[in-house]
Image (cartoon, rainbow, N blue to C red):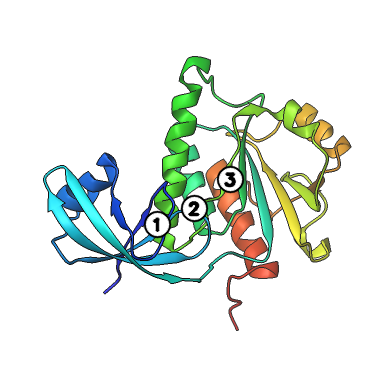
Amino acid sequence: MRLTRLWVDSPLQTGDQLILPAEAAHYVVNVLRLRLGAPLIIFNGQGGEYQAVLTEVQKKKAILKIGEHIAVERESALLLTLVQAVSRPEHMDYTMQKAVELGVTRIIPVISERSPPLDKEKMTKREQHWQKILISACEQCGRNRVPMLYPVQSLTTWLDNPLNGLSILLDPTASQTLSMVLQPQQLTILVGAEGGLTEHEITQASQAGYMRIRLGSRVLRTETAAIAILAICQAQWGDLCHLS
């Protein structure tokens, strides 16, 4: 039976008692309905994971006894950065979740010319919402390190940063394909919002050092494009198993 995995924002040490935060306690007690003595796995993003046992259960409170530390990592050797133009909420949420499952290291949400309007007053709430998605996806997929989520910024602002490793942007009109790319250790991928990047943005990114890449003969939706390119790169150079 697969154990429940929980991320906690707290130092962890074998033998300690851990009082779960209210939201996590509610999830364990009222959603999962775990009982006294139930085993769990907990992690805090600092490396590895810990075995734990539920030692006290109340309606709004749960306490764990922290057990053995397991020095297991499930991170890809390929350092993947996804620069994702902010798209519609449901598409952005899906992209964030699947990017975590596919081993992305960093996610940079950027405002592009075709991004939907984003209320600056609600931006902090959106970022907090995305952070919860990243944590939840790590709990589900077995990762013990939560990808770094950067604050929302304009695409122009991001493109002013120096490049690390290979940087590519998805462009269905590009002549180059991934087969022309040499194996990278660090890879940054830029994906547009609904409708893709504008010609001005493609030119701007190209001048910043991004290589224009097409995936195939069909135009993919933004949420499909991001997941497809991440999966292909992990299969080609990362830790997704090759079919053979």
Q: Nearer the viewer, residue 137 or 202?
A: 137
The residue labelled by disc 1 is 139
Which mark sits nearer the N-terminus, 3 or 1? 1
- Number of numbered discs overlaid on the protein picture: 3
Instruction: Tell me the amino acid under the disc marked 3.
Output: Met
Binning the other alpha carbons within 10 Å of mark 1 as few (below 14), some (14 to 19) or many (20 upward) gives many
Quadrant containing the C terminus in the rendered view? bottom right
Which mark sits nearer the N-terminus, 1 or 2? 2
x, y percent for residue 76: 62, 65
In-image side of 136 versus 83 (left or right): left
Which mark sits nearer the N-terminus, 3 or 2? 2
3 vs 2, front mark? 3
Q: Is residue 221 visible?
A: no
Report the residue at 78% width, 62% height from top: 184
The residue labelled by disc 3 is 148
Instruction: Tell me the amino acid under the disc marked 2.
Output: Lys
Q: In the figure, residue 228 lies in which quadrant?
A: bottom right
x, y percent for residue 116: 54, 24
Instruction: Tell me the amino acid under the disc marked 1.
Output: Glu
Secondary structure type for disc 3? strand
Residue 98 circle label: 2
Quadrant containing the N terminus in the rendered view? bottom left
x, y percent for residue 75: 58, 64
Q: Is residue 22 visible?
A: yes
Q: In the figure, residue 132 lies in which quadrant?
A: top left
Report the residue at 61% width, 53% height from top: 105
Q: Nearer the viewer, residue 41 or 199?
A: 41
**Between marks 3 and 2, how big is the CA–CA gap?**
15 Å
